[in-house]
Amino acid sequence: MHHLHYLFSSIFVHFSFHFESKMALPILKGLLQDYVQSLLNEKIIDERFSQIRTKLEEPDFIQLINVYLNDVESRLSEFSCFIDSVDVNFSKLSLMAHKIEEKSTRIGARHMKLASIHLIQACDKEDHKLVSQSLCWMKHEFINTRNKLQPVLQMEQRILRLMSKQT
């Protein structure tokens, strides 16, 4: 699947710089749809993501995903600070993980949702080592999810620019 994402990213970059005609918009929308389908097939995202993408206008969708990514990144940094403290408050960490799970569920970030559930369970067991391992896995899933969503955001922004040029 990694090769497929690389292929879509490569096509998108080439396409973005060399294709500005009226035909560009439907082609770019098709590429975006195929890329999103590949993320669904890979289970990085779920149907909720596609529903939101369909329901919202491009600027709102782009903003929603950017806010999600920034918020989760901030919460993961905060989580790391709390886990490194001498007196770990596992119930507070569990609440923080629940927030990430809720946000991930809301936008359809399936891998992040699963990693959050795993982290919540580790916090509930109050096992520092297990919490550290779960947090490491969640950070990995976040980086992976963010990297997979970046081409979606780039293509959506490109679609916006093309649509504004056609009006």
Image (cartoon, rainbow, N blue to C red):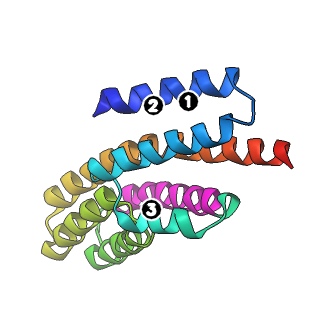
CB atoms of marks 1 and 2 within 8 Å: yes
Residue found 37% across the figure and 63% down from its top: 82
Residue found 72% across the figure and 48% down from its top: 160
- Dominant secondary structure of the magenta stretch? helix
Q: CA distance from mark 3 to mark 2?
A: 18 Å
Q: Amino acid at mark 2?
A: Phe
Q: CA distance from mark 1 to mark 3?
A: 20 Å
The stretch in magenta equals 61-83
Question: Is-magenta flag for residue 3?
Answer: no
The number of discs equals: 3
Residue 21 visible to the viewer: yes
Q: Is 66 left or right of 136, judged from the image as shown?
A: right
Relative image position of residue 147 (x, y in whole percent)? 44, 40
Residue tagged 2: 8
Residue found 35% across the figure and 70% down from its top: 101
Residue tagged 1: 12
CB atoms of marks 3 and 2 within 8 Å: no
Q: Earlier in the sequence, mark 3 or mark 2?
A: 2
CB atoms of marks 1 and 3 within 8 Å: no
Pick whichever, 71 or 124, lies toward us.
71
Q: Is 75 left or right of 45, judged from the image as shown?
A: right
Q: Amino acid at mark 3?
A: Ser
Q: Earlier in the sequence, mark 1 or mark 3?
A: 1
Q: Secondary structure at mark 2?
A: helix
Q: Is residue 68 above or below residue 55?
A: above
